[in-house]
Image (cartoon, helix red, strand yellow):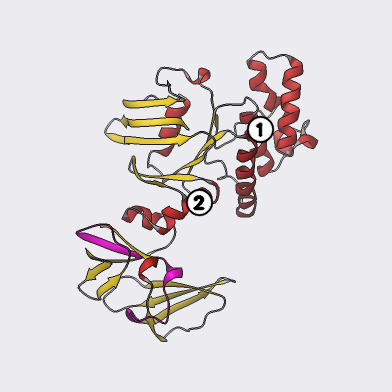
Amino acid sequence: MTLLSINGVRRKFGDVTALDGVSLDIAEGEFFALLGPSGCGKTTLLRILAGFETLDEGTVTLAGDDLTKVPAHRRPINLMFQSYALFPHLSVAANIAYGLQREGLPKGVIKQRVDEVLERVGLAHAAKRRPQQLSGGQRQRVALARAIVKRPRLLLLDEPLSALDRKVRAEMQLWLKQLQHEVGITFVVVTHDQEEAMSMADRIAVLNHGAVEQIADPVTLYGSPATHFVADFIGANNFFSGTAVDDGLSTEVFGFLPARGGVTGPALLAVRPEQVSLTGDLLTGRVLDVSFYGGLSRVAVLVAGHDTPVLVHQHGAPRVAAGDAVKLGWAAEDAVVVRA
């Protein structure tokens, strides 16, 4: 069932168009991500949902109710800020209880709900500590606990993991996804980190220059990007330009290259480095560089007539060296033709 519906939302700041007719639906209980580079409009959209920003055109409805005229403090929506915004002079428990106290709930109810959420986020032992006595990951859990203790219909998260180091961020990605399933609240997360979005979200909307490029699950976004921008933004890709034909791309330099089609006219073929083989029959080149990253070898191949090296990813240790002549290829189902 659709919980949140965004239709034709536009927002301009002077001559700058932050959102240009954004439309998307988010289902009840879904973990949804707004993904895109800085300045693409994702945070503006989040602030509109929270009620901190107005829209110029369009509608936003939550469970069928129009939110456009509803002030932020009356929306069944919570926003977790990027900075966490914890009160430094209050304990962990007091930070979490603050919103419930503002609602005037009985003390017994507040204590019960705070204790429950502290247990859920694994911080029952730290209830009396101050935020400065916690690690970055623990502070993030406090901010999340404060957001979910009010039991909102929708929880908005603005770059929630950006302040954490890589190892802690990976742990928190898994924990955040597990928490969302446990509490059953619809999550909408804003991020510019594709890995973060791909690892956590059920579906992702990729934004660019204030417009939606594609909405899909992570597997579809990675394997079947709809546009050049999505193919380039999500993971690494090799691109070849030409004209779309049946079952592939026609190029001036390399002739026919096989791929999944679906578009017409000027187009680009996109093929992931892990799908390119060093024993194919489509292209010939010479190895420029080889880098080893533990379980993965990254091979850059110079191909005459191609502007940039073709990247090839191989599992395990490298099996070629710089200067080696190689032949490249891929299966048609592993490449996709997108609009130029």
User: Where does the magenta region start and end?
Assistant: 260-284
Q: Taking 335 as reference, is 302 above or below it?
A: below
Task: Look at the picture and state if 158 lies above or below 285.
Answer: above
Q: Position of residue 169 (x, y in %)?
A: 61, 50
Total labels: the figure holds 2
Residue at (51, 17) in percent of width and height: 74
In the image, 129 versus 67, the foreground residue is 67
Q: For this view, does 81 lie left or right of residue 168?
A: left
266 within the magenta span: yes
Task: Classify 311 as above or below 190.
Answer: below
Give the answer, above or below, for where 300 lies relative to 320: above
Report the amino acid beneath label 1: Ala
Q: Nearer the viewer, residue 241 or 83?
A: 241
Q: Which mark is residue 145?
A: 1
Task: Report helix, strand or loop for mark 2.
Answer: helix
Q: Which mark, by number, is residue 281?
A: none
| Residue position marked by numbered label 2 in the rendering | 198
Image-based side of 234 in relation to 139, left or right: left
Q: Position of residue 214 (x, y in %)?
A: 36, 47
- Residue 91 visible from this viewpoint: no
- Residue 34: give x, y in percent of width and height: 45, 42
- Mark 2 / mark 1, whichever is N-terminal: 1
Could you say which quadrant of the image residue 340 lies in? bottom left
Frontmost residue, 69 versus 135: 69
Q: Residue at the spot x=57%, y=44% of the render? A: 161
- The residue furthest bottom is 324
Q: Inspect this view and state whether residue 211 appears.
A: yes
